[in-house]
């Protein structure tokens, strides 16, 4: 199958831009979440990188962004091409089923038969021709009636990702690599992750979902009928003057549930979920250890330094330093160190403990220290 060099017919890209990336505190905050940062050194935010990756696949006029009201100005500043009717604002976070479901319902009302693809605003993807090829196969499988996800071929026994266990090959025109999904597996221990990689039938769950909008809503209604009813009520009013009143009435009552649980896992159990193995480099940059790895190219002896005007003096040290203060930071004989220096908070940990940063955020919430969140 040829990689598409023009927009894919009937395809609409959806970018859920929510969450604060609590494992990246104190860099990522409620008012400046992960997707609004340049974490790769590209000179652009992760959100802008995502737009540049998706706009050629659907066309820039067919990209919808779902984000919080508080982030509207920042999102629109990053994406001046984003059309006003393609901005969907959440009054408060209600998780991915509500965000993606509402996008699907709005677009299905505007354009019956539309195929949507949901891709997170804060992931890093390289080998973009391979990504475009995988999306084209996923759209073909979605057009055949499947709920589709793109799973990533593991390069190591990572414990920070969920996994998808694949089963037999599917016979879908236009999607020769499509497999059926046997089940989804939560983040494993290192020993289990090693078994998954050795097995060869497990892919990383990258949270990419592609489906005909009507099929996605149909699957959501099977497991969460009340949530679907609320989403459809919102969509019915969305392009009318009644939108504001209906949002205020309905949105706070929507159930918080991830689309993995409401749609993907039930579809896998029913045999209606297809997986396209992605051969491209992917990372959800979920913690500082993954950012350090991105910048070091996997060389553990290197020290990654981020931040305009960062002043770092290092001797026999490795890991990552992110500085936004201009303060001199000296490191001597420390390996796999993580130092995040912001004007009002300093984090010091190690790569091995990077996943635990979320617990610090939870503790700050409990202590009432919301001024640094």
Image: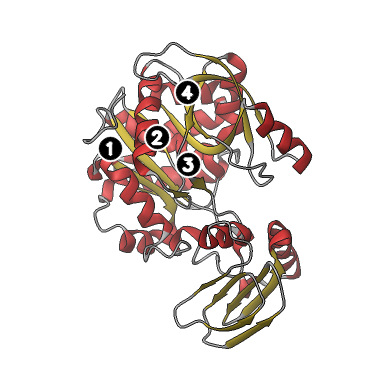
- Sequence-wise, the earlier of marks 2 and 3 is 3
Quadrant of res 9: top left
Residue 147 numbered tag: 4
Within-10-Å neighbours for mark 1: few <14, some 14–19, many 20+: many
Disc 1 target residue = 58
Would you place residue 285 above or below residue 192 in this image? Answer: below
Tags 2 and 3 in contact by the CB under 8 Å rule? Answer: no
Residue 117 numbered tag: 2
- Sequence-wise, the earlier of marks 2 and 1 is 1
* Colour setting: secondary structure
290 or 31, which lies in front? 290
Task: State the CA–CA distance, disc 3 to disc 1.
Answer: 19 Å
Within-10-Å neighbours for mark 3: few <14, some 14–19, many 20+: many
Tags 4 and 1 in contact by the CB under 8 Å rule? Answer: no
Would you place residue 24 above or below residue 126 in this image? Answer: below
Disc 3 target residue = 99
- Sequence-wise, the earlier of marks 4 and 2 is 2
Residue at 44% over, 50% down: 121
Tags 2 and 1 in contact by the CB under 8 Å rule? Answer: yes
| Residue 328 x/y as whole percent | 58, 88
* Mark 3 or mark 4, whichever is nearer to me: 4
| Residue 30 x/y as whole percent | 54, 64
Task: State the CA–CA distance, disc 4 to disc 2.
Answer: 10 Å
């Amino acid at each position: 199958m040829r990689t598409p060099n023009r927009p894919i017919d009937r395809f609409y890209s959806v970018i859920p831009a929510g969450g604060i990336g609590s494992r990246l505190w104190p860099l990522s905050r409620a008012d400046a979440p992960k997707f609004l940062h340049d974490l790769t050194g590209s000179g652009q935010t992760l959100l802008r990188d995502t737009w540049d990756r998706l706009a050629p696949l659907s066309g820039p006029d067919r990209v919808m962004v779902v984000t919080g009201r508080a982030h509207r100005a920042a999102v629109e500043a990053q994406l001046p091409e984003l059309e006003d009717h393609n901005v969907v604002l959440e009054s408060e976070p209600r998780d991915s089923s509500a965000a993606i479901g509402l996008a699907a319902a709005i677009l299905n009302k505007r354009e019956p038969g539309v195929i949507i693809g949901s891709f997170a605003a804060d992931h890093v993807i390289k080998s973009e021709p391979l990504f475009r090829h995988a999306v084209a196969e996923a759209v073909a499988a979605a057009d055949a009636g499947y709920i589709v996800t793109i799973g990533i071929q593991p390069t190591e026994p990572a414990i920070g990702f969920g996994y998808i266990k694949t089963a037999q090959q599917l016979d879908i025109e236009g999607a020769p690599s499509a497999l059926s999904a046997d089940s989804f597996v939560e983040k494993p221990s290192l020993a289990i992750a090693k078994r998954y990689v050795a097995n060869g039938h497990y892919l990383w769950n990258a949270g990419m979902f592609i489906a005909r909008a009507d099929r996605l809503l149909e699957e959501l209604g099977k497991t969460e009928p009340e949530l679907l009813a609320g989403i459809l009520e919102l969509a019915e009013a969305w392009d009318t003057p009644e939108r504001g009143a209906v949002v205020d009435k309905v949105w706070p009552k929507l159930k918080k549930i991830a689309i993995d649980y409401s749609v993907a896992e039930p579809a896998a159990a029913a045999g209606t979920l297809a997986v396209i193995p992605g051969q491209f480099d992917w990372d959800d940059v979920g913690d500082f250890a993954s950012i350090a790895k991105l910048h070091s190219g996997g060389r553990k002896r290197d020290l990654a330094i981020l931040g305009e005007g960062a002043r770092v003096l290092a001797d026999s040290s490795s890991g990552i330093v992110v500085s936004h203060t201009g303060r001199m930071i000296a490191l001597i004989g420390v390996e796999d160190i993580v130092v995040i220096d912001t004007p009002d908070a300093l984090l010091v940990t190690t790569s091995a403990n990077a996943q635990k940063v979320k617990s610090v955020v939870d503790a700050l919430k409990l202590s009432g220290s919301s001024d640094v969140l």
